[in-house]
Image (cartoon, rainbow, N blue to C red):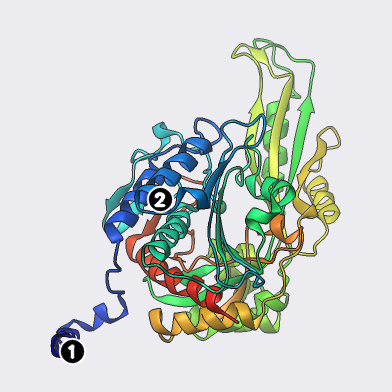
Amino acid sequence: MIISRLAALAAGVAAALAPIAAEAQTQAQPGEAAFRAMFKEMIETDTSAASGDCTVLANKIAARMQAAGFPAKNLKVMVPDGAPKAGNLVAWLPGKDPKAKAVLMLGHIDVVNAFRADWTRDPFALVEENGQFYGRGVSDMKSQDAIWADNMVRYNAEGYHPRRTIRMALTCGEEGGGFVNGADWLAQNHRELVDAGIGLTEGGGGDLDAEGKRLAVTVMAAEKVFSVFTLEITGPGGHSSKPRNDNIIEALGQALANLKTLSFPTQLNENSRLYFETLATRADPETAAAIRKVLADPADPAANAVLDRSVSYHAMLRTTCIPTLVEGGHATNAQPQRAKATINCRTLPGASVDEAEAAIVKAVHNPLMKVTRGLVGAARAPSPPITPELVAPIRKVAATIFPGVPVTPMQETFGTDAGRLVAVGIPVYGFSALFRGDDAGNIHGLNEHISVQSVMDARSFMYRLIKDYADAK
Ligand SMILES: [Zn+2]
């Protein structure tokens, strides 16, 4: 008793002497070295559809968990038939109350392709530099995956016996590219392994401003809808030494330049209103003033121009469509016979994909350009309503780890696997507790990164939050 009082006294003195900037920092949590090793192994195992293998990583995580004492009987690597590289890992920590619905920690372990030649650092090596982690998947979403697996290991090691069963599903195929979507496959074929009364996956987290100030803790309340269109034009071709005046690569270039002028109107809904109202209380004065103007008049051009400087705000406020792939021609010395571009749209929840298509056709303004609709994500179930059972524990933990930072619902600019489980009646929400800047660490792009502090804070946050859900009545 005396020793612990002395220790507390010493800690108090140390805290009083610590610089103010350190106040917001989280104390190093137990097991950080093991967590970092788990995270490193995840990043350094390529799980991209182009060159990677989710099954390899699922087995490595399972082995690491077992080496840390997690019982082998409570985890399983699940590989869909005919898709040997699309393995998933499920694990569970049985609850005391067999009737209480489980808590699910869901994460995708596949990543978007990363080509080494384009990156400054090796995308499949975990690099720590200037307070940032770099590597494919550090932000999307292996940091959260590592936090989930680490939670399981820690809970088990400390003999924690939750009221509700805690489930974890680390799945493949969220990013597409040829892997079977594991969240969907489990929901359809092995529901018992992912069934839950509440689940969390990527999306939301927290917003940092350009100076690294925490603006808001965000809970995903809606997702934009993914759709794909193809622009294609064909011609007779011919020898490149005898040019025709109707070169189809030039025509495609013109169509794409025309598309640059396409902009969808600013539209607010309940979620984006709540989000921007919260941000207006914390953002810099110029941004705050612009937000207030847009809330009053969504069409205000000057205020929109200010908010459009942020790639996140721009995308939250409207439907967007951009070219993402282009191909054309067949030889250096021939006139092209076929030229093609892929357009990826992200429509606001509830917005019509037909309208987006009509807007593309109009902007392209060339009857010879064939516009075809490809994949549409509209079949996704809408996000479940945000409930007090979800948010109250987030507020409670946020008050301790991020004191003074407001918690708000937000509309995510991308889609997640949440909808795959929501579709079968399992309410899964987007919440990561990871704070990121405007570009979210350039996810899907080059030199993906996330701050080390952000990952360590999220680890502390989720360790407490999942326990709160698991012990909830
Ligand atoms: Zn992701």
Ligand 1 closer than 8 Å to label 1 CB: no
Residue nearer the viewer, 99 or 16: 99
Residue nearer the viewer, 119 or 54: 54
Task: Residue 253: tell me if it is visible.
Answer: yes
Indicate the secondary structure of the residue bearing disc 2.
helix
Residue nearer the viewer, 260 or 141: 141
- Relative placement, left or right, of 61 versus 86 is left
Q: Earlier in the sequence, mark 1 or mark 2?
A: 1
150 in relation to 461, above or below: above
Amino acid type indicated by mark 2: Met
Distance from Cα at disc 1 to Cα at disc 2: 35 Å
**Could you say which quadrant of the image residue 381 lies in?**
bottom right
324 in relation to 298, above or below: above
- Quadrant where the image shows the C terminus: bottom right
Task: Residue 279: tell me if it is visible.
Answer: no
Number of the front mark, 1 or 2: 1
Ligand 1 closer than 8 Å to label 2 CB: no
Percent position of residue 199, x then y = 61, 65
Q: Name the residue located 45 percent from the left edge and 60 percent from the top edge.
A: 152
Q: Residues within 10 Å of mark 1 (few under 14, many from 20)?
A: few
Q: Name the residue located 68 percent from the left edge and 28 percent from the top edge.
A: 249
Rendered image: mark on residue 1: 1
Indicate the secondary structure of the residue bearing disc 1.
loop
Percent position of residue 81, x then y = 67, 32
76 in relation to 341, above or below: below
Amino acid type indicated by mark 1: Met
**Could you say which quadrant of the image residue 314 lies in?**
bottom right
Q: Residues within 10 Å of mark 2 (few under 14, many from 20)?
A: many
Q: Name the residue located 63 percent from the left edge and 54 percent from the top edge.
A: 193
Residue under label 2, please give it: 65
Percent position of residue 316, x then y = 64, 66
